[in-house]
Image: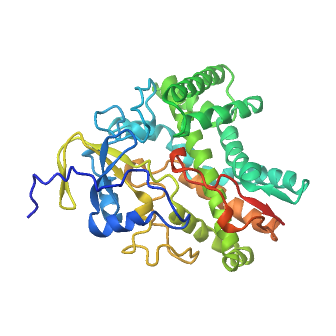
Amino acid sequence: MTDPSASGLAAPAGRTLPIPRTCPFSPPSDYAELREEEPVSRLGLPNKDEAWVLTRYDDIRAVLTDARFSSDVNLPGYPFFTPERPSEQPIQLLIHMDPPTHGEARRKVISEYTAKRTRDLRPRVQRIVDERLDAILRGPRRIDLVAEFAVPVPALVMFEQLGIPRADHAWFLSTNSLLISGLTSEADRDEAFGALSGYLMELIEKKEAEPGDDLLSRQIAKNKESGTYDRTWLTGLALLLFIGGSENMTGMISLGAMALLRHPEQRARIAADPSLTPGAVEEMLRCFTIAELTMTRVATEDVELGGKVIRAGEGLVALTNAADHDPAVFPEPDVFDIDRPARSHLAFGFGAHQCLGQSLARLELQVIFDSLGARLPGMELAVPFDELRYRSDDEGVFGLAELPVTW
């Protein structure tokens, strides 16, 4: 029987999150060691706090469906990866809500991500991808695929979905990059949050008077009709959707392209048989699990897990990248294999907070990799693989800093 007093408060020596990756296809080796030796352990955080850290797939799935772990960032003990604890924000984001508020808020917008609506978005996504590839093919035969393709394509999809005017795109992107980067000071991050929130609040006010064919306009009409309209909530939703739908996608596009360039035989099979693309996308999501530090919680009561007692008020980090490389679930997890049945990965999270826009993300990635294969069949790395530069783990979402390619 487990000793309920065994809280395990001492963090393993020398281990502090985030732990840098040494290979894009594999999590840090520390994850495997923790999973085998101490799957529920204490690690340090950049702000000198500590948090419980989970590395096993089954433990993480269990926690992400356990109501005793809260997503509310304003609760004492909630873990952060910034040097200072962020100031309390006036707008509560959907991902930081708990039941019943979370369920009520999610139901307001879930109709935007039905299977039918996602299918209906395919022509728009295809048009954006084709226009960007048209521009690329008119230019020099060497580009940075991150700057020229992986950044603008998902951003344009989200700009169109939210109805953000083209004249504001550059400002919005640059301000958003300040908000999400772990390298931004707390004061600058607060300023960026205020600027983006203020902009979106004004945009929503304009759409109340002059609605368009976009998600925000539909949400305004739907929620006014039901008597649940809340401009502040819609502002937070718009900000969350943009961050999730652009920044995370940029990382996945760049890493997915790099993986296919590193595995030309698998790339050739996808080009010859597009029915393999959905499976390849799931393997990319599993293999890279780029937003691995977003599954953070705080216990609201004492919980026994993996032989340890997590006390009420203690923070927890579920390392989904470790879970998606758990050999008990994914044999030979560090091998990139498009034939692997990988859809049970946790790249989109699990449980009530599973990514709202995952159907759109899958659609975008499938369109993108089919289009790259068809229109840039001779694309190859313009620099040796070992010279590729990756984003710092402090920057929030893993990905390539640049991906020089030629064709």
Task: Tell me where residue 106 sits by quadrant.
Answer: top left
Q: Is residue 226 left or right of residue 272?
A: left
Q: Does 317 appear above or below 185?
A: below
Q: Is residue 205 left or right of residue 63?
A: right
Q: Is residue 322 left or right of residue 373?
A: left
Q: Nearer the viewer, residue 70 or 78?
A: 78
Q: What x and y, as percent, mark residue 134?
A: 86, 54
- Does residue 116 appear in the picture of this structure? no
Q: Nearer the viewer, residue 385 or 114?
A: 385
Q: Does 41 appear above or below 152?
A: below
Task: Tell me where residue 202 sits by quadrant.
Answer: top right
Which residue is painted at 38% across and 53% down in the image? 351
Which residue is painted at 36% across and 64% down in the image? 57
Q: What x and y, as percent, mark residue 385?
A: 68, 67
- Does residue 79 appear in the picture of this structure? yes
Q: What x and y, as percent, mark residue 51?
A: 30, 47
Q: Residue furthest front?
A: 14
Q: Nearer the viewer, residue 61 or 261?
A: 261
Q: Quadrant of the C terminus?
A: bottom right
Q: What x and y, as percent, mark residue 276?
A: 64, 74
Q: Does 172 appear above or below 5?
A: above
Which residue is painted at 70% across and 76% down in the image? 264
